[in-house]
Image (tube, rainbow, N blue to C red):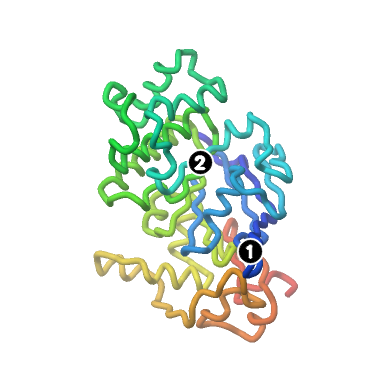
Amino acid sequence: MTVMNEDILRVKGLVKHFFTRLGTVRAVDNVSFAIRRGETFGLVGESGSGKTTVAHTLVGIYKPTGGEAYFRDQSLGEDFSHRSKALKKNIRIVFQDPGSSLNPRWSIKQILELPLRIHRTSYGKNHVEAVSELLRMVELPPEEYLYKYPQAIGGGEKQMVAIARALATEPDFVALDEPTSALDVSIQAKIIKLLTRLQKKLDLTYLFITHDLSLMRNMANRVAIMYLGKIAEVAPTREFFQKPLHPYTNMLLSSIPVTSDEEEKLKPKQIRSTGEIPSPVNIPPGCSFHLRCPRCMDICSRLDPVMTEKEAGHWVRCHLYPAAGQ
């Protein structure tokens, strides 16, 4: 088993803005974190929080507006999309919607052959044998699926093909962008079990993105929560759920549906927010959560808080927990 004491990916001050006729969308605004080799790092947030933009920027789909990122101490450069073939091979992504991420005009064999041809990795076999091995790895019999097209298989099977495509280059790091949200509940469990098994077998590191906190509890080693382009809190998973600090974290945890009185007792006290989520084009000054926060203070509307480590590995960005010297 991998000892998770080495940072495989370090992100410092990542910024991604989109410039539109309506104004500047500050999708990701000065985000920093590190992911350890072999772990699953969870990134949680409501729709529009910026979590998917973080993943798409790191894998090179978007060019960052600012910030730095390092993979095994190798800089991803100012333009992540122009990274080396070796970095593209080692950093892969599984998208949220398997239906739109697979070419409907290509057979599954063609879809899985493409990364093998680009990166010349075929496990020492010809491409048909390599594709067959990839399909078996994700529990799809190659004799049934090699020559099928995406529209002929179900959503769960499409996502298994997408996972196989991500693994075709033998990567070390995979970003999982809500990989189960478009699937039925029964299929979700199968995909999560598959991802867990593959992580152990192939020594993979995951960035796991979701809005489902219940799923994150069982999947992640550490959890970061995002709100309007910024990280509000980062903690080991057990501590994140047992001792949440940020009012936004408490608000989300208190809204998780439960099935027993015992689970209800473990939830934070119900917190009701006021107002609506501000537009990322017009983020309020100070703490971006202050307009909805039940514990808002005067300073919250004037000064944006900084990340503070309250306990070992537990960071929070909130004026309720000022940094030393403030």
Observer-side mark, 1 or 2, equals 1
Q: Is residue 285 above or below residue 237?
A: below
Residue 124 located left or right of residue 265 = right
**Does residue 38 show up?**
no
Q: Counting residues from the N terminus, which is met first, the one under dot 1 or under dot 2?
A: 1
Task: Tell me the amino acid under the disc marked 1.
Answer: Thr
The residue identified by callout 1 is 20
Q: Position of residue 77 (x, y in %)?
A: 72, 42
The residue identified by callout 2 is 93
Q: Position of residue 222 (x, y in %)?
A: 51, 52
* Label 1, label 2: how far apart the Cα atoms are: 27 Å
Residue 317 located left or right of residue 143 = right
- Write the residue at 33% across / 25% down: 147
Task: Tell me the amino acid under the disc marked 2.
Answer: Ile
- Write the residue at 51% across / 63% down: 48
Task: Choose between 255 and 53: the one closer to the eye.
Answer: 53
Residue 201 located left or right of residue 9 = left
Q: Position of residue 7 (x, y in %)?
A: 62, 42
Q: Residues within 10 Å of mark 2 (few under 14, many from 20)?
A: many
User: Residue 279 lies in what quarter of the image?
Assistant: bottom right
